[in-house]
Image (cartoon, rainbow, N blue to C red):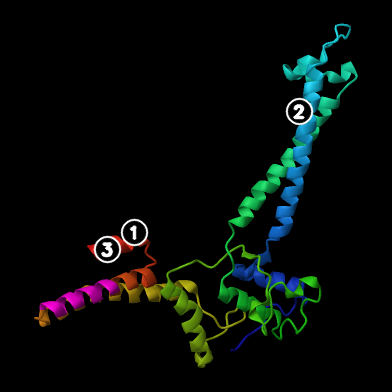
Amino acid sequence: MPSNDPFQHIVVGYPKLAAKIEIQPEAAIFRKFGALNAQNLLYFQAELTCLEQELRDQQLEDDNDRNPDQGVKKCKYAKSWDWLRDSQEDGDTTQLDLVLKIRETLKEYNHALLQQSMILNLSSPGKWDLHNLQDYLQAPEMGPLALEGEDATIWGSVKDRKSHKPDLVALCPRRREDAFSSWVAESAIVNLFRCGCARFMKPSRIHGVVGYEDSTIYRITYWITSILASLIPIASIVILYCVYSMRARLGIIAAFNLLVAVCLMGLANAKRAEVFAITAA
């Protein structure tokens, strides 16, 4: 497949990989470090649990402190923020210090919790995009050892496609279409390239390789599915018109119902309720 390296002036390694991600956002594949993030939240949770118990004990101790000789009674801390805020005048800021420490820890905990929630909703990388990144990391433009650190094996390798880390996420995943469109985009086109069709195409000046736009593939599959959707009812009417046996007609109706259901799932990505409603109609 012809190629033209658009990053000849960029140093091999992280700079060159970052340049590729810039022009191909689908290659922005990183680890989400699920175990480390979960462990961080567990530590926050444990720390806040201890601080919460300390605060409850201190609140109970201060509430029971009703010394009439004391100018300001600590029992008022639980009833007025002003008394708690000015507790330094009483010479005891234990409860106030705990409240302020919990406030800062809660802020960090809530921030980490929301971040983890967003990370868990990120999609896994597509098979084609991950393989493309593996190919690029071992391409002649990057050299056989583009990355030499502990992170060099994060994305796996060409020799062992499944050796990548299991917690990879894509920041800009490729748009998910129906099964037929995905098959055409990831398998059929690749096979056409292997057959030598790339010889008739020019490399992209931006990406440096011969490629195709997803929108073009989806436009073609849209026309194919639209034509097929119009032909199936016509074909069923013609066949039923030519068949006189009632048993054969019932079998043909069942076969076309099954065909419509398969097409809805494979070509239109229809939901279960939609499949039931349309086939019943």
Q: Which residue is mark 3?
A: 278
**Circle 1 — which element?**
helix
Q: Is residue 271 left or right of residue 80?
A: left
State yes or no: discs 1 and 3 in contact (Cβ < 8 Å).
Answer: no
Q: Mark 2: few, some, or many residues within 10 Å (few <14, many ≥20)?
A: few
**Quarter of the view holding residue 252:** bottom left
Extreme-left residue of the structure = 244
Report how far apart the C-alphas of labels 1 and 3 lie in the structure. Answer: 9 Å
Prevailing SS of the magenta stretch? helix
Using residue 36 as the reference point, say whether residue 2 is left or right of it. left
Which residue is tagged 2? 56
- Whichever of labels 2 and 3 marks the residue nearer the N terminus, that label is 2
Q: Which residue is mark 1?
A: 273
Q: CA distance from mark 2 to mark 1?
A: 52 Å
Q: Are marks 2 and 3 in contact (CB under 8 Å)?
A: no
Q: Mark 3 belongs to which amino acid?
A: Ile
Amino acid carrying mark 2 in the image: Arg
Horizontal side of 11 relative to 262 (left or right) equals right
Q: Is residue 255 magenta?
A: yes
Highlighted range, magenta: 246-258
Q: Secondary structure at mark 2?
A: helix
Q: Earlier in the sequence, mark 2 or mark 1?
A: 2
x 48%, y 67%: residue? 176
| Residue 222 placement (x, y as % from top left) | 37, 72
For label 3, the crowd category at 10 Å Cα-Cα, with few meaning under 14, some 14 to 19 and many 20 or more, is: few
Three-letter code, disc 1? Ala
Relative vertical location of residue 42 with respect to residue 246 in this rendering, above or below: above
Residue contact between numbered discs 2 and 1, judged by CB atoms under 8 Å: no
Residue ID at (71%, 55%): 37
> Which of the two discs, 1 and 3, labels the residue nearer the N terminus?
1
